[in-house]
Image (tube, rainbow, N blue to C red):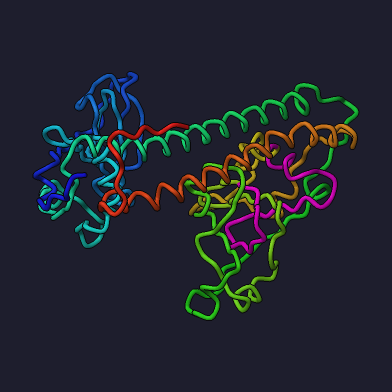
């Protein structure tokens, strides 16, 4: 096994600037700090490239690509020097959490000069680097596969909903409003100036929890409240299975709760305690999202009120058809949930291994191959 080499980051990685986003149309990805921004016909980097967010909210975010790309001016490129392994250094830079080294008073900023000057300890053997990258990549590949499976399953569920309730809709189906078939609740935020309300073990969610959410089911929340904090929320805890819909800034984030949780004022909570299931309502909202957004208003930012939401109309088929649909649709939703649990397990393993592998605390045999 190799020893760690103490050096400047610039000794082992070469950094480059991005350029203004081109206007040409094409199929080459344009990368910024938050990932792919669009596509163009030009390239300014090719081969294995690490992309690093340069400024703002995505400062220090890292991405990996192995084909021609355009790196925009809100990002930097990084390519290891010599025989160093690119995928290894992608993980190495992720582990460094580069945003912690950012400068700038109003907006965080990383520059080539800053990155070049950072002191690092790095495994100096390209073969061991490759072995480490293989371990971490195998986990990321499995996570990506499960995410893609879930995306496909959700698309299939939406297709079934359209077929059953739009394409095959009957004239004698009953016209109702949402308030007839579900219960709608709202939430609030306990005073953030009162420490006694925060840091407990009760889930409390704001729409920001869903901003990067890649699955239907919500298993955790960024913040927790205490019993005293919960007492300040009139709606109390939403039951497991509640459909959450962000009602402003923006309208349209969605999830089904897998935990009892309190909510803030940025949500419409849909409790399916009348005549339709949460799976039905989740898909109905997804497919009718433009109508939901059009029912919103507001000069500063668009918002849909609970009263406007409850007044939206829908066509309801006979009870037997709803029950049959729930039987059919429960299988893909259960698979999506199972995949999400597996994703969480794999992400936890990867996040635990990453710093240990980078620091040399856990070593990988260069002869080992990862098998699924």
The answer to whether residue 119 is above or below residue 215 is below
The percent position of residue 261, horizontal first and vertical second, equals 64, 61
Left or right side of 325 for 90: left
The residue at the point 81 percent across, 43 percent down is 276
**Residue 125 falls in image quadrant:** top left
Out of 10 and 205, give the one closest to the viewer.
10
Quadrant location of the N terminus in the rendered image: top left
**Residue 136 falls in image quadrant:** top left
Out of 3 and 181, give the one closest to the viewer.
3
The residue at the point 65 percent across, 71 percent down is 233
Out of 38 and 302, give the one closest to the viewer.
38
The percent position of residue 72, horizontal first and vertical second, equals 25, 35
Left or right side of 208 for 125: left
The answer to whether residue 325 is above or below residue 111 is above
The percent position of residue 79, horizontal first and vertical second, equals 18, 35
The residue at the point 68 percent across, 65 percent down is 237
The answer to whether residue 229 is above or below residue 208 is below
Q: Does the magenta stretch include residue 276?
A: yes
Report the magenta residues as a range: 255-283
The percent position of residue 56, horizontal first and vertical second, equals 29, 51
Left or right side of 133 for 240: right
Left or right side of 46 for 137: right
Q: Does the magenta stretch include residue 363?
A: no
Out of 290 and 99, give the one closest to the viewer.
99
The residue at the point 58 percent across, 34 percent down is 150
Label count reads 0
């Amino acid at each position: 096994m190799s020893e760690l080499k103490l050096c400047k980051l610039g000794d082992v990685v070469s950094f480059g600037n991005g350029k203004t986003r081109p206007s040409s149309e094409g199929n080459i990805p344009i990368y910024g700090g938050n990932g792919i921004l669009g596509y163009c016909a030009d390239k300014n980097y090719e081969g294995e490239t690490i992309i690093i967010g340069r400024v703002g909210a995505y400062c220090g975010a890292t991405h990996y690509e192995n084909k021609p790309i355009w790196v925009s001016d809100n990002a930097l490129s990084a390519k290891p020097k010599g025989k160093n392994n690119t995928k290894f250094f992608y993980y190495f830079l992720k582990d460094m959490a580069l945003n912690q080294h950012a400068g700038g008073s109003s907006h965080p900023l990383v520059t080539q000069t800053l990155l070049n000057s950072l002191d690092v300890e790095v495994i100096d053997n390209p073969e061991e680097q490759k072995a480490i990258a293989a371990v971490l990549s195998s986990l990321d590949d499995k996570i990506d596969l499960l995410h893609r499976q879930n995306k496909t399953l959700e698309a299939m569920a939406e297709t079934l909903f359209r077929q059953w309730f739009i394409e095959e809709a009957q004239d004698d189906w009953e016209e109702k409003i949402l308030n007839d078939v579900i219960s709608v609740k709202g939430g609030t935020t306990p005073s953030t100036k009162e420490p006694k309300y925060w840091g407990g073990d009760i889930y409390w969610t704001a729409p920001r929890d869903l901003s990067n959410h890649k699955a239907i089911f919500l298993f955790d929340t960024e913040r927790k409240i205490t019993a005293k904090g919960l007492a300040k929320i009139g709606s109390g805890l939403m039951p497991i299975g509640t459909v959450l819909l962000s009602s402003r800034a923006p309208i349209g984030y969605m999830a089904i709760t897998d935990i009892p949780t309190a909510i803030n004022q940025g949500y419409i909570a849909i409790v399916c305690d009348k005549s339709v299931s949460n799976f039905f309502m989740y898909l109905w909202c997804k497919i009718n999202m433009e109508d939901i957004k059009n029912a919103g208003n507001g000069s500063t930012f668009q918002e849909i009120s609970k009263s406007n939401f409850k007044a939206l109309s829908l066509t309801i088929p006979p009870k037997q058809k709803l029950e049959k649909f729930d039987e059919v649709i429960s299988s893909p939703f259960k698979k999506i949930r199972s995949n999400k649990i597996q994703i969480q397990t794999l992400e936890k393993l990867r996040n635990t291994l990453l710093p240990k592998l980078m620091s040399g605390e856990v070593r990988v045999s260069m002869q080992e191959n990862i098998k699924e």
